Image: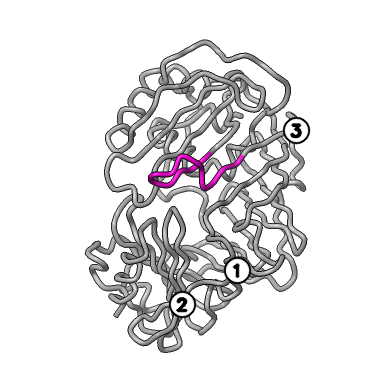
Amino acid sequence: MRRLRTISTRRLYGLVAVVALLAATAGIAQAALGGSASAPARKPLDRAVLDALRAPDVQGVSARVEFTNGLLPAGSLRGSGASPLLQGAKGRIWVAGDGRFRVELQADRGDAQIVDDGSHVTIYDPASKTAYVAPSHSEGGKPHDGTPPTLADVRRGLNRLATSWTLSGARPGTTGGQPSYTVRIAPKDDGGLLGAAEVAWDAVHGVPLRAAVYAQGNDKPVLEVKASHVSFGRIADSALAFRAPQGTKTVQLDPPQGAGASGHGKPVRGAAAVSRQLDFPLAAPAKLAGLPRTSVRLVRMGDANGALSTYGQGMGAIAVLQTKGSEQIGSGYRLPQINIDGATGTELATPLGTVLTFNRGGVTFVVAGSVPPVAAENAARGLR
């Protein structure tokens, strides 16, 4: 695919990390999991990555996908209405040659969707009938200039990545009956509860076949995505379009200030600027649970504004979402209750992190991070 073959050096630096953490959305669909084959020839990691980036372009890919989610504790899901994003599911994926994609995970009470239209990523959760929308490209990123990466480019990217992550070599083998290479990546320092991630890619097409995420001290993946029944060819625009079901609520990250129907405008960031857009007091201390505040962004839930703050860096960071209202996120699940300075909330502890939600003074707070429950609780109690 041309978008993956012609990539700027700046974006190449983060390629392996991005694939390892986000392949569960777009890249994993570009797989061919049929037939049988023997392992490819052994190669150094830099050469295997370069060959993948320079593999021949295809017009598009469609496939069946299977998503396994082992994050939730047993017995926490009620009935059959749980989101396929939480309990795992099978579905379909379509990826266009320019990188746009749509993932559809099927369930009896509605299909979950993950869609990238080239400018925004939309994640639709049928259980809550909510669509979460965020920019799909980081601000300030430069578009690729069409120049294929060189071996020197790949080595610089891997060397930069290796300052914070431990990388395995490109392990030859077979994945889903296809010749493949597998790389394992693990944080060197504070990775939160993340232990490692693995990505296997097709040795011929240069596209991912499998992605898996492991928690610390666990040799079984808690998240895994794999694809099968793959077809190559042009993807119709209709297969990539997201159509919001009736009654869908929208949560928009970085909504532009003063934007009209065109969506143009400047995102609102910074504690002071965000606070002026809220009709409730913003709780964003300079430090939280010993971590410095790194950003505050405006979010929008339907017609109401909210705030998303982050504390710390990397995988050990903590995020805080605050919106006006009393609806408890996660109220449809059997989750342990917790008291936050007199406010009753719920806490979801998983092998990869903790999500804690509570309501105080008509404002709902959600605290989340790849941290143990005690760290999330300390952060929640520091929100003043």
- Residue bearing the label numbered 1: 250
Residue 323 coordinates in the image, percent (x, y): 47, 77
The answer to whether 122 appears left or right of 350 in the picture is right
> Can residue 82 be found in the magenta stretch?
no
- Quarter holding the C terminus? bottom left
Secondary structure of the residue carrying tag 1 is strand
Amino acid type indicated by mark 1 = Thr
- Give the image's coloring scheme: one colour
Residue 337 has which mark? 2
Nearest to N terminus: mark 3 or mark 1 = 3
The answer to whether 179 appears left or right of 323 in the picture is right
Instruction: Give the magenta-colored segment's residue range.
Output: 212-225
Residue 175 coordinates in the image, percent (x, y): 61, 26
- Relative to residue 284, is residue 60 depicted above or below? above
Residue 151 has which mark? none
> Can residue 217 be found in the magenta stretch?
yes
Please give the name of the residue rendered at 54% of the width and 73% of the height, measured from the top-left corner.
301
Please give the name of the residue rendered at 63% of the width and 46% of the height, measured from the top-left corner.
67
Amino acid type indicated by mark 2 = Gln
Secondary structure of the residue carrying tag 3 is strand
1 vs 2, front mark:
2
Residue 370 coordinates in the image, percent (x, y): 39, 56
| Neighbourhood count class around disc 3 (C-alpha, 10 Å): few under 14, some 14–19, many 20 upward | some
Measure the C-alpha gap from mark 3 to mark 2: 43 Å
Residue 117 coordinates in the image, percent (x, y): 62, 49
Secondary structure of the residue carrying tag 2 is strand
- Relative to residue 374, is residue 24 depicted above or below? above
Measure the C-alpha gap from mark 3 to mark 1: 33 Å
Nearest to N terminus: mark 3 or mark 2 = 3
Residue 229 has which mark? 3
